[in-house]
Amino acid sequence: MSTGTLSLSPQEAIARDRIVERVASRHHAPKVGRIRRHVRAALLLRSLAERLDPSVQSPHRADLHVVPGPHAGSPRPWTAAPRRAPHRHS
């Protein structure tokens, strides 16, 4: 589409410039604020290690909220019987 013969009002010209800026910022800007997949996996592994062995806590996370482990009398998750769905009557 050629804009050589098209005359725009000042409002239309401003709107066109804003649209061009918005499209350029969306498509050409680097993505920020996303945790990459390997970083998320590392954080998950670290939290699992801390949960299994609380003595491995890193120093900067010692003052954060502590997630309690399973109680002494409760079955371990890997030995618990699988949950079964209730029987459905047809």
Image: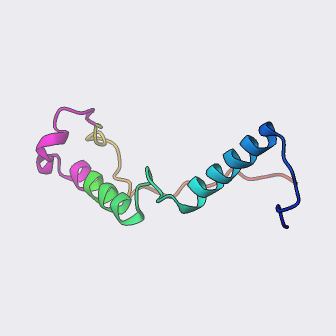
In the rendering, at what x and y percent does residue 29 appear?
Answer: 50, 58
Q: Which residue is drawn at 62% across and 50% down?
A: 21
The image quarter containing residue 66 is: top left
Q: Which residue is drawn at 22% across and 50% down?
A: 50
**Which is more toward the observer, 28 or 18?**
18
In the rendering, at what x and y percent does residue 23 appear?
Answer: 65, 55
Colouring chosen for the image of the structure: rainbow
Is residue 6 shown left or right of residue 81?
right
Which quadrant of the figure contains the N terminus?
bottom right
Is residue 80 shown left or right of residue 67?
right
Judge whether 46 appears above or below 68 on screen: below
Is residue 1 shown left or right of residue 18?
right
Magenta-colored stretch includes residue 58: yes
Judge whether 12 appears above or below 43 on screen: above
Judge whether 63 appears above or below 44 on screen: above
The image quarter containing residue 13 is: top right
Which quadrant of the figure contains the C terminus?
bottom right
Q: Which residue is drawn at 16% across and 37% down?
A: 62
**Which is more toward the observer, 18 or 65?**
18
Is residue 35 shown left or right of residue 54?
right
Image: magenta residue range:
49-66
Q: Residue at x 15, y 47 (%)?
A: 57
The image quarter containing residue 73 is: top left
**Which is more toward the observer, 62 or 68?**
62
- Give the number of marks: 0
In the rendering, at what x and y percent does residue 18 appear?
Answer: 67, 45
**Which is more toward the observer, 64 or 53?**
64
Magenta-colored stretch includes residue 85: no
